[in-house]
Amino acid sequence: MSAGGVEDDIPQGERKTVTDFCYLLDKSKQLFNGLRDLPQYGQKQWQSYFGRTFDVYTKLWKFQQQHRQVLDNRYGLKRWQIGEIASKIGQLYYHYYLRTSETSYLNEAFSFYSAIRQRSYYSQVNKEDRPELVVKKLRYYARFIVVCLLLNKMDVVKDLVKELSDEIEDYTHRFNTEDQVEWNLVLQEVAAFIDADPVMVLNDDNTLVILSNRLAETGAPLLEQGMIVGQLTLADALIIGNCNNQVKFSELTIDMFRMLQALEREPMNLASQMTKPGLQETTEKPARRENPHKYLLYKPTFSQLYTFLAASFKELPANSVLLIYLSATGVFPSGRSDSEGPYDFGGVLTNSNRDVINGDGIHKRNQSYKEMHCLHPGDLYPFTRKPLFIIVDSSNSVAYKNFTNLFGQPLVCLLSPTTYPKALQDQSQRGSLFTFFLNNPLMAFLFVSGLSSMRKGLWDKCQDYLRKINRDIAQLLTHSRSIDQAFLQFFGDEFLRLLLTRFIFCSVTMRMHKIFRQETRNYPESYPQLPRDETVENPHLQKHILELASMLDVRNVFLETTLDDY
């Protein structure tokens, strides 16, 4: 019988099922491919398109579940094709998280990626002589690892890395491809990312405790009666990373990873107990966005950075704050300048690519030349028309001490030390110590104290004491008579309150640490300056540091008394 005759034997209903499935599959691919054409900045242009894409994938996923037998028999639906649909849905949820900063969507991405693994959707791919299908499987693993890292599911990450390693070995052995080096680099990057935390917290049975550094209910010190603070809310954040030789994975340096977690609450499930992974209707989004919206910019050019800054500035709601976090290599002035303007102290390098003009690279031998992708303090002046909170972690962070508040809006810059003691410099690949303090102050304290592991019981006890320190810092700040009002304007927001208290804890710790005093005498600074005697050199806080050190039996690392002269 001819092929046409066989097709004529297919019942009309089943033929329609196959036709409808093909239509949904084509439509879903078309919409998904269109996502990359959407602007990455701005919060409104993309929402309706994402909604349509979600709707089509909802229908496609449910359709293949309801008609699996017909699609198996008449269409020849393979399990890896089902896995491909689930993988696309996982990607959708992950990108929705990136667009909205709602951590709940990470759980949904995890749900779909887990289903692929549990149901072995990609298990038959290795039997087909098609390297492009194996690459789809490898990319799925890489995406799943990113989601698990963001959710702190480190046990799953380690299992996935082992599986990915086996898959890469099989892939390169069978197909002798040219991308073997690239995939091995992926493995090396994720392995370094997992090992970035220098301190282990252990249970009594020596198993590793998985810690989350997102904002929990007990995280930020509560505002107490009598604390007069502003009503500003952190609405938008740009997290920018360009540090040479720092651990990274998937265009996310360890510094960027730590800072984004410091600006998020713990994720919650969007739906109560789902028996099977399935798309939530887009109308079931959380009623209120708990997290500030974020842009993650890895090595942006100056034009890219300014575009994102302008978009954030434009869409910033009333009574809201824009945060700019810069983790980048310092750019220093190339020669002496007669003036001391906002472009004369250098800045930070956001992109390492050299610009080429007429085929020739520009070299620093030209003293009048300024690095094109250097972000100078003056570059941010236009954005100080609205409340601005800046964190600079760089070897030239002090360039941002020379800020001028031109528009009278609240403005604060938190600045890292520009140099670290030799013993700590050797650990710089694992991320900056300053950002580490802002992300996980107790672990950073243990690290500078020379500890590499501790028991969970003592960890919990120290965390309780750290909360007491944060409460006292909040009291000192809000009752200070000489503090710049900008700090208090920002103190009403939970995220910014926590960053400010951690900044002061970091500053007091470094000022009391013997190695910092002996080697660098270089400490975190701020614009405007904090009143030292009431904050970073406060005797009450110094006693707290010594008490915390005593709990950890590392009091010998710190000075018992500090000198007034810095």
Image (tube, rainbow, N blue to C red):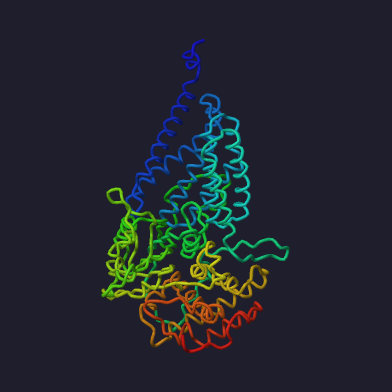
Q: Which residue occupies 58% across, 57% down?
A: 194
On screen, residue 250 above or below 291: above
Given the current orientation, which residue lies at the most extreme top position? 1
The residue nearer to you, when weighing 165 against 466, is 165
Q: Where is residue 124, by image quadrant? A: top right
Q: Where is residue 171, by image quadrant? A: top right
The residue nearer to you, when weighing 199 against 1, is 199
The residue nearer to you, when weighing 79 against 9, is 79
Q: Position of residue 167 (x, y in %)?
A: 60, 40
* 4 left or right of 453 in image: left
Q: Position of residue 137 (x, y in %)?
A: 54, 39
Q: Position of residue 266 (x, y in %)?
A: 52, 62
Q: Which residue occupies 34% across, 73% down?
A: 411
On screen, residue 122 above or below 271: above
* 144 left or right of 232 in image: right
On screen, residue 61 above or below 536: above
